[in-house]
Amino acid sequence: MGAKRTLRKLFLFLVFSLLFFLMLYNSGIASTGREDISKVAVAAGKEHSVVLRADGTVWAWGNNSFGQLGNGTIQNSAKPVRVRELDEVIAIAAGDYHTIALRFDGTVWAWGDNSYNQLGIKKDQDDVSTLTKCKPVQVKHLTKVISIAAGARHNLALRSDGTVRAWGDNSYGQLGDGTKESRESIRHVAYLGKTQAISAAGFSSAALLTDGTIRTWGANRHGHLGNGRRTGTQLLTARVEDLTTVTAVSMGTEHMVVLKEDGTVWAWGNNTSGQLGDGTRFNRLQPVKVRHVENALSIAAGEVHTLAVTSDGTVWAWGGNSYGQLGDGTTRDRPVPVNQKELQEIICIAAGDEHSLALDANGSIWAWGSNWSGYLGNDSTKSSNIPVKALLNLNDAT
């Protein structure tokens, strides 16, 4: 009888132990966190960096002179700080000195510089409270949004019906409403067609349509809109000719990059720093294939440099490198892509004006390039031409 009791106790112990373990695993306590890694994101502004965690919170670091870190102050921070009064976020984007976020309910929130109404608030020079916001404010009259993008001083929002909205600076027609009038109110981007992805940078905008083609609008210095002209502005959207089967688009300040279905990367526009990756420094009016980069999964275009992640989880970088933003240990420009083999299992990248960000599958954030106001996030203001770890791991509890 005693032996039976002992066996029964042992059996119950094992059952409860197993149930306890499963409970822990399902709650995430015993998890590696990788099942949620697809929900995270990184974004790079002109001089600040932004990260979205799987728990829906947003963190930022770097220049905060306009409140673009969203922590209620205007003090720069070389360490990650949490954006205040904002949760359940599913996407982020960073402009020059402002930041925007998309919540799960389809609303958009913005903070930082509002000099061009890019927060969706009409600025009033006599009311200082309208010029900057140090904490997130909701962009009014904008719902059912599924994706966002930020240019230097304007924003785009893709709605669930495939239409695109825009607001903020419109000096170069980057809002796509046929005018050059800046808007705090939300404008409908005209003559676009059903859209699946959007991108903005500098004073230009782009949309990837559901048929795999690209349409662009805004500033066109060096021909980066792909309309066959080298200069001027484009107030209404126009198709980039002879370009199909595109799956991703990234607008740089004066160049543009796309990813095609076959994993190849194509670029056009300004190439004075080699940011098109074709081995030359000649500007291009039509797309040219980036050399050496195959099986690409994602792309990111900065001011004068470009990044790509390939299927082996490594990063390729090319273009301007004056601040070490290519992360290859030098400050030499690279007209031909170089592979950063020291970075492994990279799942997400972002390119700022003079710095770069990457997120790996373990939740580590890597940063490199210029760092004068601490936007590498490693509690330093020293620039780095090799990747350094930011002081935030997305798998750690906060």
Image (cartoon, grey):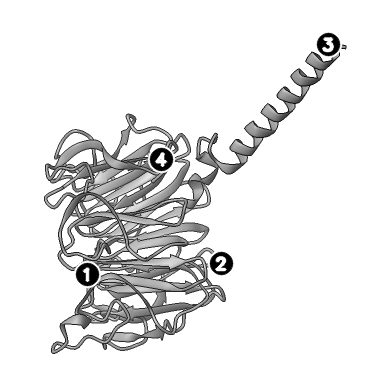
Q: Label 2 belongs to which residue?
A: 211
Label 1 vs label 4, nearer the camera: 4
Q: Position of residue 358 (x, y in %)?
A: 34, 44
Residue bearing mark 1 = 221
Q: Please, what secondary structure does the residue beneath circle 2 have?
A: loop
Q: Which mark is residue 2?
A: 3
**Mark 4: amino acid:** Asp
Looking at marks 4 and 2 on the same chain, the residue that comes earlier in the sequence is marked by: 2
| Residue 227 vs residue 73, the one in the foreground | 73
Q: How many labels does the image show?
A: 4
Of mark 1 and mark 4, the one earlier in the sequence is: 1
Out of 242 and 254, give the one closest to the viewer: 254
- Amino acid type at circle 1 is Arg
Disc 1/disc 3 C-alpha distance (Å):
88 Å
Find the distance from the CA under tag 4 to the CA under tag 2: 40 Å
Q: Which of marks 1 and 3 is nearer the N terminus?
A: 3
The residue wearing badge 4 is 396
Tags 4 and 2 touching, CB below 8 Å: no
Give SS at disc 1.
helix
Q: Residues within 10 Å of mark 1 (few under 14, many from 20)?
A: some
Residue 366 is at least partly visible in this image: no
